[in-house]
Image (cartoon, grey):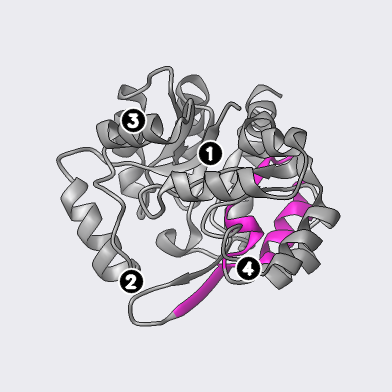
Amino acid sequence: MEIFDAHNHIWPEKVVYKAKECLEMLRFVKKLVTLPTVDNLLKVMDESEISKSIVSSVASYPRQVVSINSWLFSIKQKRLITFASIHPFFDTFKEELKRIKDNAFGVKLQPEFQNFYVDDEKAFHLYEELQKLNLPVLLHCGREISTSGEICSYSSPERILKVVKKFPKLKIIGAHMGGFLMWEESLEKLAGKNIYFDTSDSISVMKKELLEQIFVKHGFDKIIYGSDFPIQNPKEEISFIKALDISEENKQKILSSNIKKVLSD
């Protein structure tokens, strides 16, 4: 069974220790699986029998966009599919999106790290251009919990629904089953709509009844496997998906077929 991991983060080796410290000490209460470098990701992919992975590195500030993307473009290889960085408040975003279109397959947005509400009209010009260029966007959805316990919801399912309705042709991959720790709202607001859900940090920890309700309402054609490396170990969620009481065809859709369709359409 082919496996395609649609949600991974990596950094250049010169800043990887700083990134690790930031994620572990300032953002999350858990240790990373390993240092998020290209070589370590490829090693984890081999161990988990993953054929290809989408990789990204988020620009927290507009000034970081170009340099981050130049690095991402430089590490391109057959097994790593680049989703470039973009920021809704980056002045020359149209020029950068042209460069992204030539060198990558989509973009990653992380509203909590980038400090913008997903339904802020100031971001609409970016969505419009992404829709025009047919560039998919991997979007963090739901809450983000820091070590202090502070909860943010820059990208709640209700806010995301406004974007889905405003930009019906925009290909959105909603990370964390459409709303990390907001799965009931994701079921109510987003399931069945024109948005893909990725499984990262979610599918194996959700209540069984809720997961089954999402499967029924959203269908299996719009659910995509993602690990959120280096936050999670891909092996664990892959094993969970393979053990689900669903058809082999639907497991294959989740593990690779759906994301391949997104990238080829």
Q: Amino acid at mark 1?
A: Ala
Labels 2 and 4 touching (C-beta < 8 A): no
**Measuring 63% from the left and 47% from the top, which residue is drawn there?**
243
Q: CA distance from mark 1 to mark 4?
A: 21 Å
Is 162 covered by the magenta stretch? yes
Residue wearing tag 1: 6
Considering only order in the chain, which callout, 3 or 1, is on the residue closer to the N terminus? 1
Image quarter (top left, top right, bottom left or bottom right) of the N terminus:
top right
Q: Which residues are magenta?
A: 151-180
Q: CA distance from mark 2 to mark 1?
A: 23 Å
Q: CA distance from mark 1 to mark 3?
A: 14 Å
Tell me, for residue 226, which label it has, or none.
Answer: none
Q: CA distance from mark 2 to mark 4?
A: 21 Å
Considering only order in the chain, which callout, 3 or 4, is on the residue closer to the N terminus? 3
**Measuring 78% from the left and 54% from the top, which residue is drawn there?**
215
Crowding at dot 4, Cα within 10 Å, few <14 / some 14-19 / many 20+, comes out as many
Considering only order in the chain, which callout, 4 or 1, is on the residue closer to the N terminus? 1
Residue wearing tag 3: 42
Q: Quadrant of residue 47?
A: top left
In the rendered image, residue 229, in percent from the top left (x then y), is placed at 40, 47
Query: Is 14 on the left-hand or right-hand side of 104?
Result: left
Query: Is 245 on the left-hand or right-hand side of 112?
Result: right
Considering only order in the chain, which callout, 1 or 2, is on the residue closer to the N terminus? 1
Residue wearing tag 2: 29
Residue wearing tag 4: 156
Q: From the image, state whether disc 1 or disc 4 is nearer to you.
A: 1
